[in-house]
Structures are given as C-alpha cells and as structure tokens.
Image (tube, helix red, strand yellow):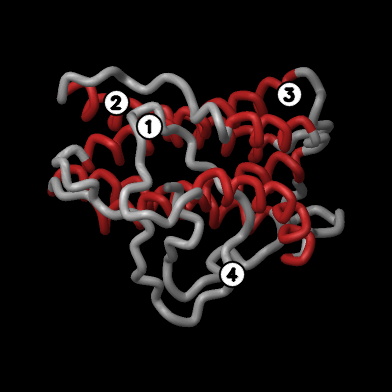
C-alpha cells in the first residue's frame, strides 16, 4: 500500500476490482446463501464477509436483505452477526500487524501502521459493545468468526505479500461491515440497538474512505451508502 504522496504507482479502481473479484464470488455466495425470509442462524453466525468493492450508486438502495424471523429474537441474531464480523475484523488487522512486525509486508509507512492499530482497537471496542448486548440478554459472548467464511478470508490473506494487498483486503472487510450495519438498521427493532448499529456504520465507512484514499482512489465513490454487500 502506497501513500498518495509517494512516487510509487497508485492502484486504479480496475486493480481493486480485479483483486476483489475472486474473493467476492466465494464470500457473497457464502454470506448471502438463501433468499428466504429467515436467513439468520444462531449467534455463532459470524463474519458475514463478502468481498469486493460495491458498484457505483446513482440512487439510494433501500432494499433489506434480511427479514425478522418473527420470534422476537432478531435483535440478538443481528448482535451475534455483528459480533462475529468484529471478531474477523480484529483478527485480520492483528494478522496484518503481526506480518508487518516480521517483515512479511515489506516496508510499512508509520501512518499505515498507526491506522491499522487504531482501526483494530475500534473494532475491538465495537465487538465489546455487541457482546455486552448478548451477555446482557443471557447469551454467550461471540469469540469466534464464522466458521464458513473465515477460511475464505484466511486464504485471501495468505496471498497478501505487501501493504497494498493488506489494504485491499481490509477495504473489503470495512465495506462489508459498513454495508451490514446499514442493513441492520432496517432490521433491528430496539432503539438502542439501531443507534449502536448506526454509530458503528459511519466509523467503518470512514475506515473504508481512508483505505480508498491511500490506495489512490476517490475516498467517497458512492452517492448513497448501500446494503449490497451486507452479510446475511
């Protein structure tokens, strides 16, 4: 990953799309799965990681990918989904830091290392918030990412050899998280839970904007935030 002020070539949007395509196909299929009304499972539903960059938007996407199960537990299911997303985000950022520490990503600009450290800490705080919702309702805290999706993300990370590749993977995760939290606001019923999802969604969107910028892309490419990549 090159900072915009360096003389190294910047990635074009075509490069980002090419890097995301292979991961995106597998993750979208795994995360979206069925189009049935009730697509959620237990609180171990985890990472919800689809990958890729969302298509350009000219109109607001107001569709809802998930529908309440009708059993009064939808808020807790969303909390479990969100917590699993945060577990994956924290783990991915930590893996990037560990790789950087051993020289596995080459030269890492200090600003990049600072961003990764800060973003990881914020995702940990977000995980703690969702787990507080779960444990407050008598449920177990989520500590593991989704077992179906994590191997796909791990396989993608195994191909990362520099900070640019790490940034592209982080960008995908942030876009998925932001999209999922926007969608969650259409599904959640509790006011506090809706506010929590909304307060996190904007932070993840800001993470994505920073990553787009340092990858040489316009940081706010869409007219409206969308739910296209929302985890199911």
Q: Position of residue 35 (x, y in %)?
A: 43, 56
Answer whether labels 3 and 2 touch (C-beta < 8 Å): no
| Residue drawn at x 49%, y 27% as measured from the top left | 145
Tell me the residue that label 3 is attached to: 99
| Residue drawn at x 67%, y 30% as measured from the top left | 154
95 to 118, vertically: above or below? above
Tell me the residue that label 1 is attached to: 83
Mark 1 or 3, nearer chain start: 1
Q: Position of residue 68 (x, y in %)?
A: 23, 50
Mark 1 or 2, nearer chain start: 1
Between the residue at mark 3 and the residue at mark 2, the CA separation in whole angstroms equals 28 Å
18 to 158, vertically: above or below? below
Viewer-nearest of labels 3 and 4?
4
Q: Secondary structure at mark 3?
A: helix
223 to 134, vertically: above or below? below
Q: How many marks?
A: 4
Q: Secondary structure at mark 1?
A: helix
Tell me the residue that label 4 is attached to: 55
10 Å crowding of disc 1: few (<14), some (14-19), many (20+): many
**Outermost residue to the bottom:** 58
**Of 161 and 78, which appears nearest the observer?**
78
- On the question of residue 102 being in view, the answer is yes
Q: Position of residue 60 (x, y in %)?
A: 39, 76
Tell me the residue that label 2 is attached to: 131
Between the residue at mark 1 and the residue at mark 3, the CA separation in whole angstroms equals 24 Å
Answer whether labels 1 and 2 touch (C-beta < 8 Å): yes
């Amino acid at each position: 990953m090159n900072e915009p002020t360096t003389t190294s070539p910047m990635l074009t949007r075509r490069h980002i799309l090419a890097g995301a395509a292979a991961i995106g196909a597998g993750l979208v299929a795994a995360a979206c799965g069925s189009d049935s009304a009730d697509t959620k499972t237990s609180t171990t539903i985890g990472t919800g990681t689809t990958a890729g960059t969302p298509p350009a938007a000219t109109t607001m996407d107001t569709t809802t990918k998930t529908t309440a199960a009708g059993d009064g537990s939808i808020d807790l299911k969303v909390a479990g989904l969100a917590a699993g997303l945060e577990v994956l985000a924290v783990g991915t950022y930590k893996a990037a830091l560990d790789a950087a520490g051993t020289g596995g990503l080459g030269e890492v600009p200090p600003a990049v290392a600072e961003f990764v450290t800060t973003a990881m800490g914020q995702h940990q705080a977000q995980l703690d918030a969702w787990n507080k919702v779960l444990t407050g309702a008598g449920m177990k805290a989520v500590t593991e990412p989704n077992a179906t999706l994590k191997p796909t993300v791990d396989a993608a990370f195994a191909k990362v050899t520099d900070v640019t590749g790490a940034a592209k993977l982080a960008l995908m995760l942030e876009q998925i998280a932001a999209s999922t939290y926007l969608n969650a606001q259409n599904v959640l019923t509790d006011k506090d839970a809706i506010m929590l999802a909304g307060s996190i969604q904007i932070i993840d969107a800001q993470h994505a904007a920073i990553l787009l910028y340092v990858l040489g892309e316009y940081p706010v490419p869409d007219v409206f935030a969308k739910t296209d990549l929302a985890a199911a």
